[in-house]
Image (spheres, rainbow, N blue to C red):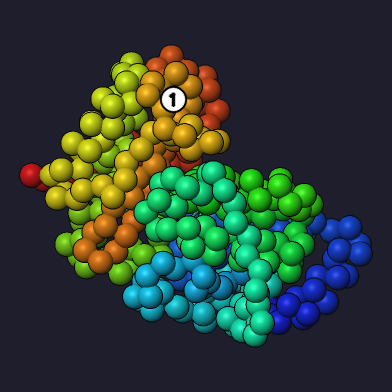
Amino acid sequence: MRTVRAVAQLRSKLEPARREGLTIGLVPTMGALHEGHLSLIRHARSHCDVVVVSLFVNPAQFNERADLERYPRRESDDAALAGTAGADFLFTPAVEEVYPPGFSTSVEVFGVTERLEGASRGREHFRGVATVVTKLLCMAMPDVAFFGQKDAQQVVVIRRLVADLNLPMRIEALPTVREPDGVAMSSRNALLSADERSRAVALPAALAAAIEHAAAGERSAQAILAAAREAMRPCGVEPEYLALVAPDTLEPIDTLDDEALLALAARIGETRLIDNAILQPAGADAVAAAHAPSQPVSGKAMTTCSA
Ligand code: AMP
C-alpha cells in the first residue's frame, strides 16, 4: 500500500487504472481506524479493482475546537490497518492541500441537513462534511464511494449532493459494526473513561427498546421514543436528541406505518456519541429480513446498565 499526500500524485497513480477501465473504490475516513472502517475497506476490496482510503481530519466539520483537538490521530497504525484490510492507496493530504490559501467555496445541502446533527451541531457541520466529501470525490473520482450507516444522516446528505451535482459515482452505505455489548464502534469511543464506556450501552439499549416495541406492534412514535428514553435512564444518560424520522427526508413521523429511522445523539462526559437503527412496523418481517443489519442492536450479548 502506498501513502499519497498530494492530489496531483493521487490522480497520476489512479490514471493507469482508470485508462484500463478498472473500478476504483473510495473509503473516506478521519482515521483512528477501527473494525467499522475496516469493514468498509474490506467490502471495497472485494467489489473494486483499486481501493483508495482517505484519511483527513476535516477541521471544517468540527463545531467545537476542543473536539477537533481531542480527535485521535494515529497515522502509522492506520496505514498498517488499511493496508491489511486491502487498501491500495492511503490518501492523507495536509490541511493546506485540501484548503489552500484563497480557498473560498463551500457546498451546502439544504433541507436534510437542518434536523438532527444539523440542528445540534449547527449549519457549519454539514457544510464542512458536504464540502470535503465533494472535494474528495472530485480528487479521487471513484466509481463507488463507501460510507457507514452509522452516520445515517451523512449518507442522506451525500446521496443528495451527488444527485444534485450530477457527480458520476455510486454511493454505497454499509451496516454499523458494533462492539460485543452493542455499542457502535467509533473513533470517539477511545476518549471515554472506563465508567463512561460502560454507560455508553445506553445508546444501543435505547435502539433495542424501540425495535422491541415496534416488533410488538407499537406504532405510536411518541410511545416508541418514550420506551427508548426509558431504556437509557439506568445508565444516567440523557439523549441530546432522540427522533423517529422518515429515512429519506428525515422529517419526523408520528406513526410507524413504514420503515423509519430512529436517530440518537448523547453526550457521555465530554464525548458526544451518535447511533441509529432502522425500525420496521410489526408484520413487515419480510422487508426487515432484507434490510437486517449484520449485527442487530438487540441481542443476548448486549448488556444494560444496572440501576
Ligand atoms: P469517520 O472516520 O468517523 O469519519 O468515519 C469514516 C466512515 O466510516 C464513515 O462513512 C462512517 O460512517 C464509517 N463508520 C464509522 N463507524 C462505523 C461503524 N461502527 N460501522 C460502520 N461504519 C462506520
Q: Residue furthest left?
A: 307
Name the image quarter holding the C terminus. Answer: top left
Residue at left offset 66%, top offset 82%: 102
Give the residue at mark 1. Answer: 280
The residue type indicated by label 1 comes to Gln
Estimate the x, y position of residue 195 in percent, counting from the top left.
17, 62
Task: Check the image and report above or below for 243 versus 3.
Answer: above
- In this picture, residue 163 sits left or right of residue 54: right
Residue at left offset 26%, top offset 57%: 267
Q: Is mark 1 within 8 Å of ligand 1?
A: no
Name the image quarter holding the N terminus. Answer: bottom right
Mark 1 Cα-neighbour bin, 10 Å: few <14, some 14–19, many ≥20: many
> Is residue 261 at all visible to an observer of this figure?
yes
Estimate the x, y position of residue 174 in percent, counting from the top left.
56, 46
> Is residue 299 at all visible to an observer of this figure?
no
Q: Secondary structure at mark 1?
A: loop
- In this picture, residue 138 sits left or right of residue 277: right
Task: Check the image and report above or below for 179 versus 52.
Answer: above
Q: Residue furthest right?
A: 19
Residue at left offset 83%, top offset 77%: 12
Estimate the x, y position of residue 32 in percent, counting from the top left.
46, 71
- In this picture, residue 45 sits left or right of residue 31: right
Task: Check the image and report above or below for 259 versus 304.
Answer: above
Estimate the x, y position of residue 295 in percent, counting from the top left.
43, 42
Residue at left offset 37%, top offset 54%: 120
Q: Disc count in the image? A: 1
Q: Nearer the viewer, residue 202 or 135?
A: 135
